Image (cartoon, rainbow, N blue to C red):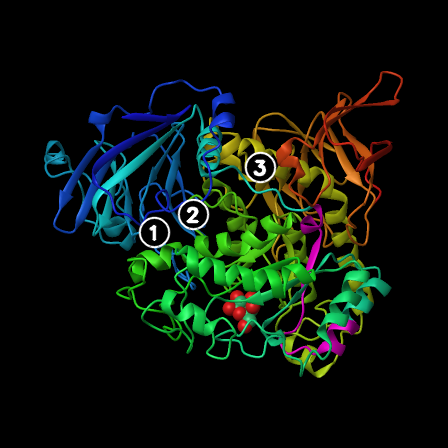
């Protein structure tokens, strides 16, 4: 076993494949940051405890799994949080409808409540059997135990291995060797941090990326877009990012990457106007290249041998293909002020709809096959699109529908066409185990109540996004799609809009707090959104909680879904305060909350001085946040905020500050800044003990 960095170990077996996430990575291990994390200093397992074998079908690995252990991770798993006793196939899929492991972002990495992480470096559709089976003969000692003949389905099929020598068995097809990486704890959170730092650290979004996002109707024309853009400002609806859906291009499905002057005549003036109104523009696209595209012929030699939607599939593992693709984006879009992209359809292994993607046996010029390319396409695509932003010295926060291993440095947030609200909430809880960010986006809704509940989840999530690509008018005017298209509006839409505005303003108020959580993600690898088990691994009551999560260090969010006026929330040990009312609750117990339609249960740790900014309609480049410190409990004395220019990469050269704000015994505020950033992004205007929202 070889030590790769502080707390990170590698076990090599045979001749691993050339095309794996580690071998193809472009990001650097954050060795120095890893060195700062305290760790036990011994690998979680001795090498003889891990069995690795070569078989005719590939590599077979067995790792120990103790009876009391619970395991999490495997990427964005929307249907389950705790994978103990389950089989998971790490296969990218645009329609992950069932709990099989299929995912927009499958990651061959898991963490255990025993306090370690395991990463298997493969791009294959590997299968992890998480303590599902015992070895032959293990149950012989039970042969005399009386066991009734089962008659119900639960008795017959509900069997779970709970004792004996359980193992995590991994099946990696095709490979003739494998590298297995082990991450020390001592707990889940530390193992995840190490994995993220090994991946290159978390991303740091621009401050505007944490504001509100609105994506407009797919068929919108220039005048429709401008009408919406003006209405948001007139109605004082905070919106930072304005997204264009497929209709902006001359061809989509596959893509030309060229503005359609028919729908958007003089698009450059339109962009200028949007920029003057302080919108950041984000463009939808996917990577399949239409024959009319200016990059088609140059990309053709660097593309796979099958088309998708009558377009090329560029081999973005090749520097030549990446260069052509990213230079086009640089010249045509990033240099013209485009702030980000929505990278759609790169999770292209559809099993449910029209089976539109390239086959697993497709061949790419790099030597990768279709299976490997499917699992890695999302990461390659993010790398390619990130490049022009790096070159321009501008941060982006963008969207992507596929990701995978070692992806935490990419400033891209995942989304899905699945739309079950509970599934979306689970995504927020679970994404942090695997270095991923997830957006529980809002489209149209079943009812105004559904709309409000969904918006509440999104404003307390990694990206606050309304994806209105199917409706021409804002959803608060009409939730029903057909009526929205016909322009028939709700009688009380102004009332619904006002509730939505307040929620958008809460998001804007949270930006300094969230930005600080993201800074820790970037520097220390600590995910900004986490399942409760990550923060409370010693409390088995948290092990299965997938409908509530931690946001930053001090806030627990428990969304409500339409149809439920109340819900229960388990509060881990410690004292908690209601975000809205400051009411105190002792942890270690479950409470029922019925906060009404306009609120969801949000609990703040006692002793927190929560920084909340005066909501702005958008985050301008030079924005200074007017921060009020909300004291949750009498002993709330100190708050720490991260500060930098909010948009460039100067922070990588040390141009940032840590701002410590404390309350003096006489109630006045003291501010201390350490760091080399000379600007000021926060003004502290006072202390409050109740929320004025
Ligand atoms: C879907 C995507 C949607 C929307 C649509 C446009 O695949 O998930 O959010 O962008 O494409 O055609």
Q: Residue at x 55, y 31 (%)?
A: 524
Whole-percent x and y of residue 348?
40, 65
Label 2 vs label 1: CA separation?
A: 8 Å
Answer left or right for 274 relative to 554.
right
Which of the marked residues, 3 or 2, is nearer the chain's N terminus?
Answer: 2
- The answer to which image quadrant residue 68 occupies is top left
Residue beneath disc 3? 522
Which of the marked residues, 2 or 1, is nearer the chain's N terminus?
Answer: 2
The picture quadrant for ligand 1 comes to bottom right
Element under label 1? Answer: loop
Residue beneath disc 1? 90
Task: Give the number of the disc on residue 75.
Answer: 2
Whole-percent x and y of residue 688?
84, 33
Position of residue 473 relative to residue 432, above or below, is: below
Q: Residues within 10 Å of mark 3 (few under 14, many from 20)?
A: many
Between 616 and 429, the one lying in front of the other is: 616
Q: Look at the image and give the residue range highlighted in magenta.
A: 207-227
Position of residue 327 relative to residue 683, above or below, is: below
Element under label 2? Answer: strand
Between 110 and 594, the one lying in front of the other is: 110
> Residue 216 lies in magenta, yes or no?
yes
Q: Residue at x 69, y 27 (%)?
A: 606
Q: Mark 3, mark 2: which one is toward the viewer?
A: 3
Answer left or right for 201 relative to 640.
left
Q: Are marks 2 and 1 in contact (CB under 8 Å)?
A: yes
Q: Are marks 3 and 1 in contact (CB under 8 Å)?
A: no
The count of marks equals: 3
């Amino acid at each position: 076993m070889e030590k790769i960095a502080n707390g990170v170990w590698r076990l090599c077996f045979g001749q691993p494949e050339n095309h794996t996430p580690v071998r193809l990575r472009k990001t650097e291990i954050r060795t120095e940051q890893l060195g700062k994390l305290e760790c036990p200093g011994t690998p979680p397992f001795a090498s003889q405890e891990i069995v690795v074998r070569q078989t005719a079908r590939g590599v077979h690995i067995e790792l120990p799994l103790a009876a009391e252990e619970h395991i999490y991770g495997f990427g964005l798993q929307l249907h389950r949080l705790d994978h103990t006793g389950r089989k998971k196939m790490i296969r990218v899929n645009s329609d992950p409808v069932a709990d099989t492991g299929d995912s927009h972002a499958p990651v061959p990495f898991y963490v255990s409540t025993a306090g370690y992480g395991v990463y298997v470096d493969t791009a294959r559709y590997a299968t992890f059997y998480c303590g599902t089976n015992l070895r032959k003969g293990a149950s012989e000692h039970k042969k005399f135990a009386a066991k009734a003949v089962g008659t119900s389905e639960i008795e017959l099929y509900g069997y779970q291995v709970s004792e004996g020598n359980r193992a995590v068995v991994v099946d990696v097809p095709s490979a003739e060797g494998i590298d297995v990486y082990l991450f020390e704890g001592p707990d889940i959170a530390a193992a995840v941090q190490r994995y993220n730092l090994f991946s290159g650290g978390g991303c740091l979004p621009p401050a505007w990326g944490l504001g509100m996002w609105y994506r407009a109707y797919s068929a919108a024309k220039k005048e429709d877009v401008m009408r919406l853009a003006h209405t948001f400002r007139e109605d004082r609806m905070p919106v930072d990012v304005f997204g264009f859906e497929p209709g902006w291009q001359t061809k989509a499905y596959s893509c030309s990457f060229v503005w359609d002057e028919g729908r958007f005549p003089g698009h450059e003036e339109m962009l200028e106007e949007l920029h003057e109104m302080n919108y950041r523009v984000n463009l939808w696209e996917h990577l399949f290249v239409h024959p009319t595209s200016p990059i088609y012929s140059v990309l053709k030699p660097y593309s796979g041998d099958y088309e998708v939607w009558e377009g090329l599939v560029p081999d973005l593992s090749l520097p030549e293909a990446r260069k052509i693709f990213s230079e086009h984006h640089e010249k045509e879009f990033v240099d013209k002020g485009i702030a980000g992209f929505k990278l759609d359809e790169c999770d292209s292994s559809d099993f449910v709809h029209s089976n539109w993607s390239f086959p697993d046996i497709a061949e790419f010029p790099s030597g990768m096959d279709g299976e490997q390319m499917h699992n890695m396409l999302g990461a390659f695509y993010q790398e390619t699109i990130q490049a022009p932003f790096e070159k321009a010295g501008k941060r982006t926060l963008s969207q992507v529908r596929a990701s995978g291993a070692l992806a935490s440095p990419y400033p891209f947030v995942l989304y899905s066409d699945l739309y079950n609200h509970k599934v979306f909430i689970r995504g927020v809880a679970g994404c942090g185990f695997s270095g991923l960010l997830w957006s529980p986006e809002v489209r149209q809704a079943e009812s105004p109540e559904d709309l409000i509940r969904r918006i509440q989840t999104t404003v307390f999530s990694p990206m606050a996004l309304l994806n209105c690509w199917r409706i021409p008018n804002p959803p608060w005017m009409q939730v029903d799609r057909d009526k929205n298209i016909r322009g028939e509006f709700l009688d009380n839409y102004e009332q619904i809009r006002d509730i939505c505005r307040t929620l958008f303003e809460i998001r804007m108020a949270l930006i300094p707090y969230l930005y600080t959580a993201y800074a820790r993600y970037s520097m220390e690898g600590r995910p900004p959104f986490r399942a409760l088990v990550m923060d409370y691994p010693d409390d088995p009551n948290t092990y299965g909680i997938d409908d509530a999560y931690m946001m930053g260090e001090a806030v627990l969010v428990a969304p409500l879904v339409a149809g439920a006026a109340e819900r229960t929330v388990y509060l881990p040990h410690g004292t908690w305060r209601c975000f809205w009312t400051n009411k105190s609750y002792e942890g270690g117990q479950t409470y029922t909350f019925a906060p009404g339609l306009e609120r969801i249960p949000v609990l703040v740790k006692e002793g927190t001085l929560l920084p909340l900014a005066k909501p702005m309609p958008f985050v301008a480049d030079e924005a200074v946040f007017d921060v009020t410190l909300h004291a949750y409990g009498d002993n709330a004395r100190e708050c720490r905020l991260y500060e930098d220019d909010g948009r460039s990469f100067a922070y990588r050269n040390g141009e940032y500050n840590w701002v410590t704000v404390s309350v003096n015994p006489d109630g006045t505020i003291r501010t201390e800044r350490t760091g080399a950033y000379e600007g000021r992004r926060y003004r502290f205007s006072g202390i409050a003990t109740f929320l004025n929202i």
